[in-house]
Amino acid sequence: MALANISLRFKFPVPQLQSLSSSTFHTLISIRKPSSIACSKPSSSSSLSAGDEVSKEANNGGEKRRKLSEQSSWEVKDSEGKDYLYRLGAESDNVNIAVGARSGMIDDVFIGDFLGKDSDIVFDYRQKATRSFEHLQGDYYIAPTFLDKVAVHIVKNYLASSLNIKIPLILGIWGGKGQGKTFQTELIFKTMGVEPVIMSAGELESDRAGEPGRLIRDRYRTASQVIQNQGKMSVLMINDIDAGLGRFGETQMTVNNQIVVGTLMNLADNPTRVSVGQDWREADIVNRVPLIVTGNDFSRLYAPLIREGRMEKFYWQPTREDIVNIVSRMYEKDGISRKEVASIVDKFPNQALDFYGALRSRTYDRSILKWVDDAGGMETLGKTLLRRKKTKEVPQFIPPEQTMEALLESGYSLIREQKLIMETKLSREYMKNIDD
């Protein structure tokens, strides 16, 4: 009779209760109030007295609850007297699946052996949100003016608490297309040992309202955690910001555009108080993280965002000396002297830095076509490039020897294509009557 009553109260079938151990059975009884058990059909006095005895023992502290540790993050209180589990539950949008999915945590009973004790198998990969630039191998040239501006901005923000001046949180680097703004910044990060969090303009829009603004705040807090937990300098960098927030012609201002602009302005005004949706807490103070943005035309941005005090502007237009030094390092392994590089730069003036990189890339075209013929022709490219990797090695590609004649020929070819685009406007051919 007692098992039947307990089964009705706890929604367990009787056979399942019979399989429970005596300690588990008494625990199930003790967690219910005596009054709720008495509401069921009266059972034998012996079972009730046993339940009352267990409840009384639990209430009197007969068995003390074992603490995990004196410094356990699960039991430590914050400034408001709330523990970790309370704060975790207060964050309505929390998706921290690593808390309950790991062995030894709160819901260990749900951890099985099918996927292993740590079921979140991509946890370690998802935590890496920063860049370390191991791919930048070799000796590159960093323009001194560019280096000074970026380094001073980073240092000033890290010393903001000890400097009695107004320090802009955002450094806006703008200038012509293909002038190496992003690449020069990455070289500086590698030189200074900075591990940044990098975003692009494509992440500033979403089909969900508010998502890009939340993403910026989340990435900002991630950079702050790099500073606090890893002891490394970090920066939040947004590339081509004017492409995502700029107003061009009659383009529409979206809700996400407004939220992103407001988020960046709020970060500049309150760089140590950043919320991602949870309740505000007095103890929730993050590290100040320098913010660097790049773009081509900042006049397209919302004026209050780029005002003095929030954003420090830096116009990057490399001089002839900067271009020669950068391109010389690029062609150094090809045996092209600095004097020859200077003559190439003078041959094609008023070109962006990426133009001189395209020269070298264009000289590879003939060698690649020769490699295709030697590997079996166009018809067998799929087998050569993909399937052959499993059985045989792909035929070795021998880079062409760089000469002044080949580089100049590639340069004139690129110039012809540039002029053809500007002079031949095919839209007029498609709509001949538009001028009538």
Image (spheres, rainbow, N blue to C red):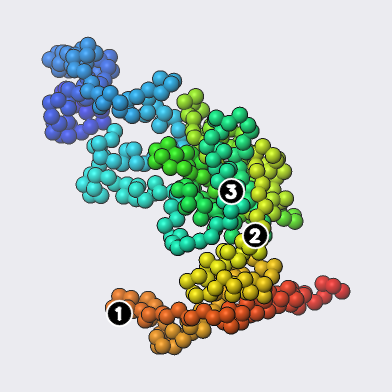
Q: Tell me the residue that label 2 is attached to.
A: 318
Q: Secondary structure at mark 3?
A: helix
Measured in 3D between alpha carbons, the distance from the residue under mark 1 to the one under mark 3, in whole angstroms, is: 50 Å
Neighbours of disc 3 within 10 Å: few (<14), some (14-19), many (20+): few
- Rendering coords of residue 381 (x, y %): 42, 82
* Drawn side of residue 216 relative to residue 105, left or right: right
Depth order, front residue of 281/132? 132
| Res. 28 in view | yes
> Residue 392 has which mark?
1
Q: Position of residue 11 (x, y in %)?
A: 26, 31
Foreground residue, 117 or 153?
Answer: 153
State the CA–CA distance, disc 1 to disc 2. 47 Å
Q: Is residue 206 at least partly visible in the picture?
A: no
User: Measured along the vertical axis of the image, is residue 339 above or below residue 44?
Assistant: below
Tell me the element at label 1. loop
Residue 272 x/y as whole percent = 53, 32
Which residue in the protein does label 3 denote? 148
> In the figure, residue 431 lies in which quadrant?
bottom right
- Neighbour class for label 2 at 10 Å: few (<14), some, many (≥20)? many
Q: Earlier in the sequence, mark 1 or mark 2?
A: 2
Give the Cα separation between the discs numbered 3 and 2. Answer: 14 Å
Residue at (51, 55) in percent of width and height: 187
* Circle 1 or circle 3, nearest the eye: 3
Residue type of the residue flagged with mark 2? Pro
Which residue extends farthest right? Answer: 436
Looking at the image, is 339 positioned above or below residue 45? Answer: below
Q: Quadrant of residue 388?
A: bottom left
| Mark 1 neighbour class, 10 Å CA radius: few under 14, some 14 to 19, many 20 or more | few
Q: Earlier in the sequence, mark 3 or mark 2?
A: 3
Give coordinates of residue 99: x percent, y percent.
34, 38
SS of the residue under disc 2: loop
